[in-house]
Image (tube, grey):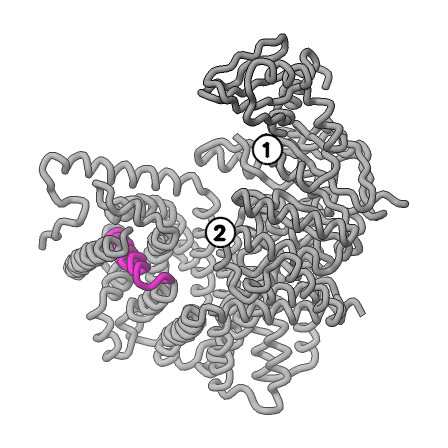
Amino acid sequence: MRFAATLRFLAALVATNLRAAYAHRGAFWLQTTLMIVNDAVYFTVWWIFFHRFPEVAGWRVADMMALQGLVAGSIGLAWVVAGGARNLARTISEGDLDVFLTRPKPVVLQAVSSTTIASGLGDLAYGVAMTTASGLVRPETVPILVVGAVCAAVAFLSFAVIVHSLAFWAGDTNTLTRQAQDWLATVSQYPESIFGPGLRAVLYGLLPAGLVGWLPVSLLRDFAWTRFATLVGATAVAAALALYVFHRGLVRYASGSRVRVGI
Amino acid sequence: MTRAPALDERPLGARHSSRTRVYLAAATIAARHAWANPVEIIGRGVFLGLLLVVFSGLWRAVPLGEGAPDARGLLWYLAITEWVILSLPLVHLDLERDVRTGDLAYLLPRPVSYVGVRVAEHLGTLAVRMATLAPVAAVLATLLAGGLPGDPRGLLLAVPLGVMAGVLGVITYASIGLTAVWLQDVTPVYFVWQKSAFVLGGLILPLHLYPAWLAAIARWTPFAALLHGPGRTAFGFDPAGAATTAGLLASWTALFAYALHRIHRAALRILDVNGG
Amino acid sequence: MEPAVEVEGLSKTYRVRIRTAGFSGALRRVFAPRTEDVAAVAGVTFRIEAGERVAFVGPNGAGKSTTLKILSGILHPTAGTARVLGLVPWEDRRALGYRIGTVFGQRSQLWWHLPALDTYALLRHVYDQDPVVHRERRDRLIETFRIGAIVTKPVRSLSLGERMRCELVASLLHAPSLLFLDEPTIGLDVTAKAVIRDFVRERSVKDGCTLLFTSHDTGDMERVCDRVLVVHRGRLLIDEPVAALRRRYIRRKVVTLATVETDVTVELPGVTVRERAPHRLVLEVDTSVAPVEAVVAAALAASRLEDLTVEDPPMEEIVAAIYASAEKGAPS
């Protein structure tokens, strides 16, 4: 009952955000379109690469298209629904969580969905186009793609929330956190088979690149229930961890010990 | 080939030396500020390390074949190109902010060139970033590539070329930033520039591994000199080639400095018209 | 009946990190920070009954906003207890959220690029309000606060006064029993302030909504509230009805005479001249020495009066006097 009300609230929140983003029509379309161009130009680097080296550790250009498409699309989805997560550290360190605390809805939800990032729609559109063009998606695998993309988005957001929550303890860490988000987005776009097992463990653990890129794509290439369960399970764990860390930080925020500059 | 005088070197009678002092002061302050931010410096180092780690795996897995450069050279190439691109401060964001907040209207009519001061500041930041990232890049590349490149003397050339490339980068970013007077939001322009640099500058793959027609096109753009120029020193010691690159970098820098000057003038005119 | 707010020995101490310049300073800040304790609120105790309108007055840094944030569930106190509408704010945050409203003068709750109506529609979901009830209440509030013409315009195109009225409507949509207002009239011109004060007071009287107002504008205190709590350096100095505060601390009256004669002299012990101009004399009267009647009688005897005004000194002076005596440590 309360869950349904929260979902309705989230839907209304995202709708309001989209309407606010669209209020500046010109900027909205410019940012969306240019992001598509930006992503497409970036892919040409890889197109050139695969032109020279057609197969790398079992990966071909089509696999790369699916991987990049999925990562870009999922991150785009994350930024559309939860654009407030991108600068959460700044929100925290500037005390902007105050208003959210006085409202009878989960603070973390209000905070991450406080805005939408218009260029995310560009990433999303690009992702859909790329994944489709890769040829790895057939009508019967579309549900897998959707679940995979949602898990990837949730995993990415969970990572973002965890790293941003450091601001509860360390003050304005926004720059560093934005960088960490870039690290995750970057690493997720490279085929995992090029990494040794040790590195893969580190990368799966610290930067959940596996959840954002490799696992979902591997399900498209070759489905297996075990890996599917791992993806959904691990994403759920990541989300739970993110909520836990954020709430511990919130307790600290409420204890007023956030870092203020004193001379 | 002598460089055309950049904005801050144009003589103007007795005011010349005092203006240079202002620019120098601006650069020093910015450099000190950048130095006082260890988090950012470390973060940049980590990102570079991550990329080198990823690519050391990639180049090991790629069947390079004969006629292609070795994996070690490719990794050093990447270390150099990333060193240049990651060190570039986001000049355009500062200029865009000045335009957006309206501060530009106050800053432009000052006796010292506003753009000159901003560029000087960012050159100071660039110096600190390049100086702190270079050792990190060198150490990581040595570890991950398994040693120095085939002819380590090439690295000696990488440093001056890289610095020149950095200067070019700052000037072009400043030009992008100043277009905020017309565009309001210059981030999309920056993104297009950045991605073009990746492709046409051969960020991860040296231009000589590109399809011939594309490599030819790329060499006509400033990006080839910006990234590929310093990067290819990883493949051998080529003083003649380095001199050519230096010449190209200098020419492109002069061209963009002139473009910046014209954009600056146009911006001044616009702000006058708007009663700014 | 249960009090709306019950606070006992409430304290809030902050630990502030001291920042030193330079690279080594920045590193030290991360690994071994030096800190200092600052008491924002120190042992505050008071009660507010349902329907009361209370002003929290004090200079910057006095602890007003901190107290408000504790009572609205934003901060946890370091010591002491508080109950708001029967709930402990930091423990029952969600339950309390449905029943309180907040207005932050320095932070907007409205979506900047959209009309206020869009924010109101979203707020219905925040408070899980029934659509029909919501619509009726919303329309009534729009009428009361006279924002009908501006609710369809993007918030960024509104003046500060207009925006504040929209914010107030937003905070009242879910019919809260208690409204927290943190510096709601800051930055407004005199007319806008007066309008807002009137609307807020009227609404509170009609709905029976308890008001807790923080401000360093004593006009807010006088026009809207019945009771005032004066805080200074985290301590509660005064807790009194506004009228009592006036009576207790005002031993001075300002008497202005407009006379037919160019120059008039009124000399009495306890009377000092504040201002002297042709046909005009402004006197400050210490009523403990010279009662007002005596001064008026003397003025009538000394001149032919065209006009006579007897006023209280502005509230600012009263409050400033209270702070001054608190600073000196004199009993207030």
Q: Quadrant of residue C285?
A: top right
In 3D space, how far apart are the residues under numbered discs 1 and 2 (Cα atoms)?
Answer: 31 Å
Residue at the (19%, 55%) spot, across then down? B265
Would you place residue A24 above or below residue C320 in this image? below
Question: Residue placed at 64% from the left, 34% from the top?
Answer: C15
The subunit letter for the residue under badge 1 reads C
The reply, left or right, for residue C273 in relation to residue C327 is: left
Q: Residue type at mark 2?
A: Thr
* Pointer 1 residue: C60
Look at mark 2 in the image and give the residue it sits on: A175
Is C299 placed left or right of C251 in the picture?
A: left
For the C terminus of chain C, the image quarter is top right
Instruction: Give coordinates of residue A75: x percent, y percent.
Output: 54, 69
Q: Quadrant of the N terminus of chain C?
A: top right
Q: Residues within 10 Å of mark 2 (few under 14, many from 20)?
A: some
Residue at x 37% of width, y 76% of height: A44
Is residue B151 visible from the viewing direction of this image?
A: no
**Considering the numbered disc 1 on the image, is that residue within a helix, a strand or a loop?**
loop
Foreground tag (1 vs 2): 1
Which residue is found at the position 53% from the left and 54% from the top? A177
Q: Is residue B56 visible?
A: yes
Q: Nearer the viewer, residue B105 or C1?
A: C1
What stretch of residues is rendered in magenta?
B162-186
**Residue C119's x, y, as percent?**
61, 64
| Relative horizontal placement of residue A39, taking residue A255 as reference (left or right) | left
